[in-house]
Amino acid sequence: MLDTSDIYGPFTNEELVGKAIATIPREKVTLATKFALYYKEDGSMAVDGSRKHVREACEASLKRLGVDYIDLYYMHRKDPGVPIEDTMAELKLLVDEGKIKYIGVSETSPEDIRRAHAVHPLSAVQLEWSLWTRESEEDIIPLCRELGIGIVAYSPLGRGFLTGQLKPEDLDSKDSRKSFPRFQEAAFEQNMKLVEAVKKLANSKDATAGQLALAWVLAQGDDVVPIPGTKRVKYLEENLGALDVTLTAEDLAELARIADPSNVTGARYNEAAMKANGLLQKVSVQRTDSKGRAQA
């Protein structure tokens, strides 16, 4: 699955994906893209979930991608000024017209997931899920399983932190991670303790820390699809190596202990970004089953 969005670039990432798949038979490619977020003239980010924008955004994405339909179309963020039923109604029409096959939502509250699913079945909920971002295990993950909705985990490597290869000096002034509490100096040092523990277990399996982190996400269930980003072929190949890592029940229990939310220092975004994206959630210690997997 190739995952993109009209705001990546903005627009240029969809165009790049379109060029990359131009010579590949359409049925061999699964395309996912998103709508709703956009940049205003002053450079600030805004959200539009109106029916008019849904349709216009879809038509524009189809053109940039050079395809007749989108496999999975996500509402990137919910527009607080538009009832989610209205947004979903237009998405349902696009399904009926054959312009999209499946509907997904991203970083949405449990209540809105239920409301959206009542209008048209959701096929996927995209959320941040990794060893050091586990808030969704309390409510959203159980809800998705109750409703039979697939889970797509973005940033499964903690924006690169869980690879153990990142150093504070690698973050230049243009790197957005530099403003995230977890990546700031004192928190960075504390969070490296978690990564070192992951590395130790990874070494015992002849794997990298990143491969172990991905293997943990994959082990959470057959309904979970992690989508790590990568800029280089060697990192893509390393990520694929996670498929060869087998985690025992004891391994999962140990990782659950290592990555207990109480061992993570700092929020994943600064407060302003959390509010802007509707991501302020209660962080709590998660319960796990005997295999170290999240339970309700």
Image (cartoon, rainbow, N blue to C red):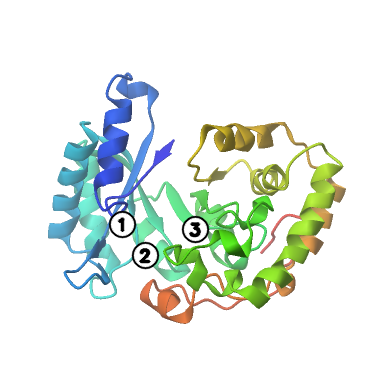
Label of residue 94 in the image: none
Determine the secondary structure under disc 1. Answer: helix
Three-letter code for the amino acid on which mark 2 is drawn: Arg
For residue 273, what is the image quadrant? bottom left
In the rendered view, would you say 63 is above or below 27? below
Marks 1 and 2: CB-CB under 8 Å?
yes
Compute the Cα span from label 3 to label 1.
21 Å
Marking on residue 127: 3
Tell me which corner region of the image, top left, top right, bottom left or bottom right, holds residue 59: top left
Viewer-proximal residue among 170 and 11: 170
Q: Amino acid at mark 1?
A: Val
Q: Residues within 10 Å of mark 3 (few under 14, many from 20)?
A: many
Find residue 119 and name its label.
1
Q: Nearer the viewer's eye, disc 3 or disc 1? A: 3
- Left or right? Give the position of 192 relative to 176: right
Q: How far apart are the two marked residues, 3 and 2, measured between alpha carbons?
A: 17 Å
First in sequence: mark 3 or mark 1?
1
| Residue 56, horizontal then vertical, whole percent | 13, 51
- Quadrant where the N terminus sits is top left
Residue 232 at what x, y percent from top left?
51, 37
Residue 290 shows in this picture: no
Q: Is residue 38 left or right of residue 121?
A: left
Mark 3: secondary structure: strand
**Residue on which disc 2 sits:** 115
Residue under the point 24% across and 42% down: 95
**Residue at the image point whose x is 36% and y is 45% from the top:** 4
Label located before the other in sequence (3 or 2): 2
